[in-house]
Image: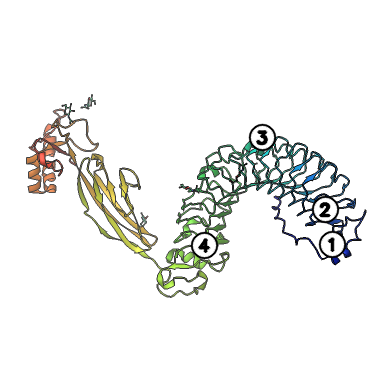
Amino acid sequence: MAAAAVAPKQAWPPWPWPPLLLLLLLPTGSGGGCPAVCDCTSQPRAVLCAHRRLEAVPGGLPLDTELLDLSGNRLWGLQQGMLSRLGLLRELDLSYNQLSSLEPGAFQGLRSLLTLRLQGNRLRIMGPGVFSGLPALTVLDLRLNQIVLFLDGAFGDLGSLQQLEVGDNHLVFVAPGAFAGLAKLSALTLERCNLSTVPGPALARLPELVSLRLRELDIGRLPAGALQGLGQLRELEIHHWPALEALEPGSLAGLNLSSLAITRCNLSSVPFQALHHLSFLRVLDLSQNPISAIPARGLSPLVRLQELRLSGAGLTSIAAQAFHGLPAFHRLDVADNALQTLEETAFPSPEKLVALKLSGNPLTCDCRLLWLLRLRRRLDFGASPPACAGPRHVQGKSLGEFSDILPPGHFTCQPALIQKSGPRWVIAEEGGRAVFSCSGDGDPAPTVSWLRPPGAWLGRAGRVRVLEDGTLEIRSVQLRDRGAYVCVVSNVAGNDSLRTWLEVIQVEPPNGTLFDPNITTPGVPGPFLLDSRGVAMVLAVGFLPFLTSVTLCFGLIALWSKGKGRVKHHVTFDFVAPRPTVEKNSGGNRVTAKLF
Ligand SMILES: *[C@@H]1O[C@H](CO)[C@@H](O)[C@H](O)[C@H]1NC(C)=O
Ligand SMILES: *[C@@H]1O[C@H](CO)[C@@H](O)[C@H](O)[C@H]1NC(C)=O
Ligand SMILES: *[C@@H]1O[C@H](CO)[C@@H](O)[C@H](O)[C@H]1NC(C)=O
Ligand SMILES: *[C@@H]1O[C@H](CO)[C@@H](O)[C@H](O)[C@H]1NC(C)=O
Ligand SMILES: *[C@@H]1O[C@H](CO)[C@@H](O)[C@H](O)[C@H]1NC(C)=O
Ligand SMILES: *[C@@H]1O[C@H](CO)[C@@H](O)[C@H](O)[C@H]1NC(C)=O
């Protein structure tokens, strides 16, 4: 039941009016005459004195006046009791005057007043008692003044006030008790003020607040619990806070919102942690934030979410299952982003979708958008339907232009295939670096990922990581890195994989001590030492046959030693260091290779 924002007063034609017209208007009025400069005929019980260069409230106002318009004059003060005889007045417009102070009791006696417009004046201070004697007031507009602070009790006992507009002031401080007594206030807009924090304690005194708009403020954070105590709040709008880069996890604690807009801020991701308790949320608007992705299932705690708006956000991907867990979801606005596609799997049930705004995205019209083509007549695409940015033969064509029977080669995909890869067997020295390259072909361009059997996908960060171009890089190779790595290239049409193997050579400390018997790898039998003769042999025979024969030897030794207690098996040779940097002063180093 939020009241609509008050529209700015439109400029009226300036005085002077044609004198003849004025003469015709003069002798009219209702009740108790009409002030000579005003118009009392246009509307019943209305006295219209806008733009008359008045410096004071004209005398002789009819006692039954319900609307008094004094906007756009030069009134500079309002004394106590000046209007007190107008007990039937319902609307008083004092906007765009030069009022700089209001005496306490200035509006005393206006028992029926519902709307009071004071925007566009020069008010600086709201002294206590200014708004006393206004038991029926529901709308108060104080925008475009120079108010710096609201002190405790600034709004006296406006017990019926439902809508308060205080934007475009110099507000730097709102005292904790400033809004005390506003028992019915349901809508509050704070915009373009100099506030550096959200006045949480003052807001907490508004038990009936349903709609709160906080716009164009230079506030960089919303601390945990900042809006605590607003249990009835259903709509919260935070618009254009350029310094807001993240929403802290508890910042919306205590709220039960049905609509939340955090637009044109600087959020770089959907603030899932701050939102997760909003199980009654129906509309979420995060438009015009630099958010690049919607991950899978992140919104699922918002079980009643129906609509998400994320236009103009720089989105590059919407994950499969992004909207899963949201049974009521049916409207999505992701217009003007950088999406190349939107896969059907993002939605729990695509046929439930009613509105989808997707224009202004560089869409690739391949098999991933077939579902959209199928639903194109039923879906509400907003102002303009999405258009293809590629492939070339359909470039610029809007989805609405395709007929039901597609020509061959339209909306198709090619499954991913491994195109080229580096060696499938890589030997790396302990502490060194190993690299496996892999790339694939397909349409749409496949993604390359790496799997460490039995089932761990490797990430983009850490010692073992997948680089941007799909290369797998292992830095500071450790013995436990030894084993298989599987390259998987995949796209929506299919996948292909290739198995590679990393062998690790253990390096002794350079000062020549024997290997540390404590360093062993589980599942690997005892280590053996290798030096220059060994390496020479390896080079002569080849690594694989060498390993095979040594394994055989060890097998025999192990059989022989069975029952004689644990024996460590060392095969010692002279050494030629395999690392190019150490090669110059070779001689004393030893290499220990692990067998498998
Ligand atoms: C409020 O901010 C405006 C613009 O940033 C500035 O001109 C004005 O002096 C500020 N007022 C106060 C009271 O700080
Ligand atoms: C928005 O955030 C980024 C960092 O996340 C920062 O570099 C940029 O300056 C911020 N923009 C504004 C207007 O504060
Ligand atoms: C939250 O708000 C909804 C209406 O949007 C209401 O039905 C529900 O009872 C409220 N829950 C709490 C805990 O106040
Ligand atoms: C590869 O495709 C098969 C079906 O062709 C599928 O079962 C499998 O899950 C896919 N693997 C990956 C990693 O996408
Ligand atoms: C060489 O070994 C000795 C102990 O035998 C040790 O104290 C020393 O730190 C080692 N030097 C290097 C460079 O590791
Ligand atoms: C090897 O491990 C034992 C205990 O398992 C420990 O007492 C010993 O100090 C370790 N030796 C070295 C060189 O770390």
Three-letter amino acid code of the residue under disc 4: Leu
Whole-number angstrom distance, CA of label 4 to CA of label 3: 45 Å
Q: Secondary structure at mark 3?
A: loop
> Who comes first in sequence, dot 2 or dot 1?
1
> Who comes first in sequence, dot 3 or dot 2?
2
Q: Secondary structure at mark 4?
A: loop
Whole-number angstrom distance, CA of label 1 to CA of label 3: 45 Å
Mark 4 surroundings within 10 Å by alpha-carbon count, few (fewer than 14), some (14 through 19), many (20 or more): many
Q: Secondary structure at mark 2?
A: strand
| Image quarter for ligand 5 | top left
Kindly identify which residue carries mark 3: 176
Residue 567's label in the rendered image is none
Query: Residue at position x 19%, y 30% from top?
Result: 517
Residue 68's label in the rendered image is 2
User: Is 58 positioned to the left or the right of 288 in the image?
Assistant: right
User: Is 105 positioned to the left or the right of 174 in the image?
Assistant: right
Three-letter amino acid code of the residue under disc 2: Leu
